[in-house]
Amino acid sequence: MPSIRVNTLRISPAELKSAMGRYGKVETVPWYPSALIVQGENLANTQEYQLGYFYLQSLASMLPVIALDPQPGEHILDLAAAPGSKATQIAQHMKNSGILIANDDAYMRLKPLGGHIGRLGILNCAVTEYDGRKLPSIMHFHRVLLDAPCSGLGSRFTHSPYSPNRLRQMCKLQKQLLVHAFDLLLPGGRLIYSTCTTRNEENEEVVQRLLDKRSDAKLEKPGLPVPHTYGPGARIELDEFFFIAQLTRGE
Amino acid sequence: MFAQFLFARFGIQLPDGLIFIERKKHVYVAKKELGGVSYPRLNRAGMIAGKKESIFGPKPSLDFVLTFGHLAIKNTIPLSDDEIRKFYQNEKINMDKEGLIIVQNAQGKGAALGHGKDGWLTPLIPKQRLVKLYKDA
């Protein structure tokens, strides 16, 4: 059954649960009040979706933002934001206040991101169009999310057949993105690195590379409300796989 | 200019802490803090509030109506949930107001934008936001 994230900027989980009952059975998710599991197909073709009451999102992909723990009024960066599931979730946690920068370099993916921002009524988000490795250091952030481009070998949506050469290039890109993401943090700031691939080379090895390059980077255990293995970085198997590493920048 | 139109037509005044940002064709609405964001490759700040010009003159976006439609105090029409459901299926509503009209739901929240003419209110909902009805083959 598909899971949805209630857009609490527009409606309460209880109100939406009641409204979605017309499409089938609706279940709550005990560890995240904004998540619902709805029996039904083609939920994007419903009035509730068009009114911006929810975002279709897998349960596992809600976890990086839960670990990021965005707070109202902060300055937050989502470095690889399109198509916008996590950026819009961050805005929701920020209660539409502070500044959220949602960056991506894929112009074609920025259009759906803009569409979701409007549909969900998000007012605190600016969208920038940079290669994530080259986002200017104009601002520094309390929290940064890098949900990195990855091979997707853990996602229920993507099963891209990558060549060994392409995979090597991707690991290099992930390492460069993570170092730049870290450099954009304010002292004491939190960085979440996540992927939906099971490959060690795209997860633990990328994190280790940052720890080797930046002496003020500290690895922490993320506060996750679901069972996971840890070592280092959390590995979670829910409706899809996610790897989540939490890093902080020394004061 | 867009702010004046919204006030004149619907009596909407933007709440404190928000600003309009005018671009070439569209007007955006955003938190005041975003006014200071200065990345050279800024794609957008906030959400599209509307078009400066359309065949109806200035026109608020559906997203603006969904977010701020509850602030409208004139040129509005309350519709039931069932009527709004039909409106999102591109069905006209029988009513006698003229020009741009904000549809509000039973709780007074903005639900849609329509255009009244000759006794009918026509949905002004972008094609991709209409709810399609599927019939069995």
Image (tube, coloured by chain):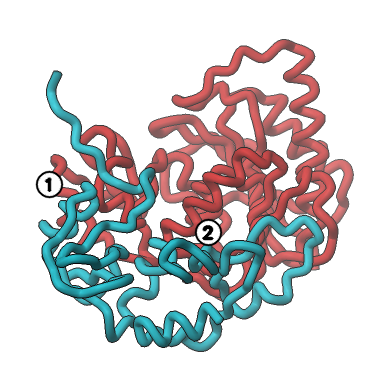
Q: Chain of mark 2?
A: A
Of the image marks 2 and 1, the number of the one nearer the N terminus: 1
Residues behind callouts 2 and 1 on a single chain: yes
Figure quadrant of the C terminus of chain A: bottom right
Residue at screen point 33% across, 58% down = B124
Q: Chain of mark 1?
A: A
- Residue type at numbered disc 2: Ile
Chain B color in figure: cyan
Figure quadrant of the N terminus of chain A: top left
Q: Which chain is red?
A: A
Q: Is residue A33 visible?
A: no
Residue in front for this viewpoint, A178 or B18: B18
- Element type at marker 1? helix
Say above or below: A107 vs B106: above
**How many angstroms separate mark 2 from mark 1 (CA)?**
29 Å
Q: Position of residue B36 (x, y in %)?
A: 73, 76
Q: Position of residue A39 (x, y in %)?
A: 20, 37
Q: Quadrant of residue A205?
A: top right
Say above or below: B75 vs B59: below
| Residue under pointer 1 | A22
Q: Position of residue B31 (x, y in %)?
A: 57, 76
Specify the label residue A90 is tagged with: 2
Specify the label residue A111 is tagged with: none
Residue in front for this viewpoint, A249 or A138: A138
Residue at screen point 79% across, 14% down = A165
Q: Is residue B14 visible?
A: yes
